[in-house]
Amino acid sequence: MLTERHVRLFKNGRNQAIRIPREFELSGTEAIIRKEGDRLIIEPLTRRSLLGLLAGWEPMEENFPAVEDLPAEPVEL
């Protein structure tokens, strides 16, 4: 697979644009772009599920105080 290819930049309204060759197409419909020095890095946006996000977190070392589990106060309607 090719790892680089010469492309041309062009204007699209007030934005600069680049046509991405087929062999470099990204999956999905959204991407993240960031600048590192003179380089632009474009990565596909991957949405993680809440379970996937929580699974990647480190356990907390903090001890939480005990909370008394009181029944709800009655409310007159």
Image (tube, rainbow, N blue to C red):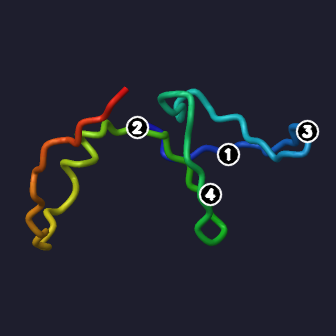
Whole-Å distance between the Cαs marked 3 and 1?
Answer: 23 Å
Q: Residue at x 56, y 35 (%)?
A: 30
Instruction: Check disc 2 and report the residue beneath it.
Output: 47
**Secondary structure under the numbered disc 2 in the rendered image:** loop
Q: Nearer the viewer, mark 2 or mark 1?
A: 2
Give the x, y percent position of residue 7. 71, 43
Which amino acid does the dot numbered 1 rest on? His
SS for callout 4: strand
State left or right for residue 12 relative to residue 58. right
Task: Name the residue furthest right.
Answer: 13
> Where is 56 relative to 39, above or below?
above
Picture residue at 48% right of the left edge, 46% below the top? 3
Q: Secondary structure at mark 1?
A: loop
Amino acid carrying label 2: it is: Arg
The residue mark sitting in front, 2 or 4, is 2
Q: Is residue 60 left or right of residue 53?
A: left
Q: Which residue is mark 1?
A: 6
Q: Position of residue 36 (x, y in %)?
A: 58, 68
Residue 30 against residue 34 in the figure, above or below = above
Give the residue drawn at x 82%, y 47%. Answer: 16
In the rendered structure, which disc, 2 or 4, sits on the residue that comes first in sequence? 4
Instruction: Please rate how many residues cluster around mark 4, counting C-alpha atoms within 10 Å: few if below 14, some from 14 to 19, many from 20.
Output: few
Quadrant housing the C terminus: top left
Residue marked by disc 3: 13
